[in-house]
Amino acid sequence: MIELDHLVAGYGAQAVTPSLCGVVERGSMTAIVGANGCGKSTLLKTLAGVLAPVSGALRWSTSRPAIGWLAQRQTLDPCFPLTVQDVVSMGSWPRISLFRALNRRARMQVSVALERVGLLAMAGTPIDALSGGQFQRMLFARMWLQQAPLVMLDEPFTGVDEVTSQLLMEQIVAMHQQGQTILAVLHDSERVSRYFPQTLRLDGVSANWGATPLQTQEGCLA
């Protein structure tokens, strides 16, 4: 799905990651791991197109697919006068247009998304009344509703309780099982080893891909 050709991620001309070569396969489920500051989130933003590569290139096997994105820190103002249903409904916009009302099918899909994260009963709740875990569930439901072929998650479990973390992990596994490609920045080594078939470990000077046919040599996959 994504070919990395000596890709270096960073900010401006400042490199943060080592040089990366290789392929993120369609339908794979990969955890990006490593110490704080090694460039995990920077790499994810580069793959998502938020940041330009410092050097090297990334290429898509076909045209760039739609990307479901869950940021490390939410940028939605919790004081904005929206309900949980309003926010989750935003996940339908790529398919129906911002200026059209949701049809019956779209409303049903919103309800399914809310049910999957345990928020159906809170559909009409103002977002400023949500706990941190509930807020993350809401954002996940919005992302899930997109049904994007490629899903990128930047530390999706940070700052949320274990019940929410496990619920979201089950949804991530289900998305992978239905064929979506998953890339996630994670810190929980136990969760990574239990659920993620592939890992990309960054240490600042080199990169290692694990549990994959590709093998690394001097930070470059052959």
Image (tube, rainbow, N blue to C red):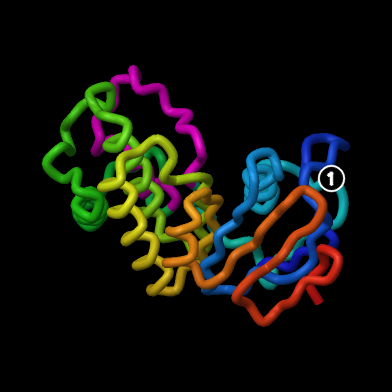
Q: Which residues are magenta?
A: 70-94
Residue lying at the far top of the rendered structure: 79
Q: Quadrant of residue 95?
A: bottom left
Q: Is residue 109 shown left or right of residue 25?
A: left
- Residue 86, percent across and down? 28, 35
Q: Residue furthest front?
A: 190
* Placement of 32 over or under 212, stated as above or below: above
Which residue is depicted at the point 55% across and 60% down?
31
Task: Give percent across and percent down for residue 32.
Answer: 60, 56
Of helix, strand and loop, which one carries label 1?
loop
Quadrant of the snapshot with the N terminus: bottom right
In-image side of 120 versus 147 (left or right): left
- Would residue 196 be seen by someone viewing this image from the given angle? yes
Q: Say which residue label 1 marks.
A: 54
Return the x and y of residue 26 as percentages of the image width and height: 57, 73
The image shows residue 13, relative to residue 33, as above or below, that is above
Where is residue 112? Give x, y as percent.
21, 56
Identify residue type, mark 1. Val
Q: In the rendered image of this protein, does residue 79 appear above or below residue 32?
A: above
The one of 28 and 26 positioned closer to us in this rendering: 28
Label total for image: 1
Residue situated furthest bottom in the rendering: 213
Query: Is 187 a magenta residue?
Result: no
User: 3 or 19, which is in the foreground?
Assistant: 19
Check residue 80 for magenta coloring: yes
Residue placed at 59% from the left, 65% from the top?
199
Residue 88 in view of the camera: no
Split into 4 quadrants, where in the image is the C terminus? bottom right
In-image side of 80 versus 103 (left or right): right
Looking at the image, which residue is at 23% across and 55% down? 116
